[in-house]
Amino acid sequence: MEKILVLKNEISEINRLAMFIEELGEELNLAPDLVFNLNLVLEEAVSNVILYAYPKEEHQEIVLTAKISDKSLIFVLTDSGK
């Protein structure tokens, strides 16, 4: 299974990211501390892209893909920033 979240490079999108991780955690029955840590790590990565990868006022998309299999959960963060 694969879930995809497409974000704008705006800091307000961090709220959508948190909701995505929370919903994924509920769906997969992940421990609350794991959901917290996943959110923390992904928030840091996404906010770095938003704040540093693009010139101000340049609107781009950031794609977060969660690949889910029997024993693994893999996140892939894709952007076209520098």
Image (cartoon, rainbow, N blue to C red):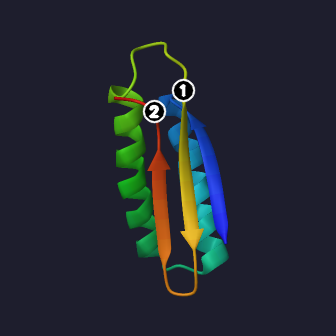
Find disc 1 in the rendering and name its residue.
60
> Total label count?
2
Look at 41% across and 48% down and name the residue there. 43
Whether residue 57 is situated above or below residue 14 in the rendered picture: above
Residue 80: image tag:
2
The location of residue 42, given as percent across then percent down, is 41, 53
Instruction: Assess disc 1: are there few (<14), some (14-19) or many (≥20) residues with their C-alpha within 10 Å of its C-alpha.
Output: some
Q: Quadrant of residue 60?
A: top right
Which of the pair 1/52 is nearer the observer?
1
Residue 16: image tag:
none
Mark nearest the camera among 1 and 2 is 2
- Secondary structure at numbered mark 1: loop
Instruction: Classify the position of the C terminus by image quarter.
Output: top left
Whether residue 9 is situated above or below residue 34 in the rendered picture: above
Q: Quadrant of residue 49?
A: top left
Whether residue 80 is situated above or below residue 66 in the rendered picture: above
Disc 1/disc 2 C-alpha distance (Å)? 8 Å
Q: What is the residue that sits farthest to the bottom in this orientation? A: 70
The location of residue 52, given as percent across then percent down, is 32, 28
* Amino acid, disc 1: Gln
Q: In the figure, is residue 74 to the left or right of 4?
A: left
* Amino acid, disc 2: Ser
Look at 36% across and 28% down and name the residue there. 53
> Tag 2 or tag 1, which sits nearer the N-term?
1
Q: What is the residue that sits farthest to the top in this orientation? A: 57
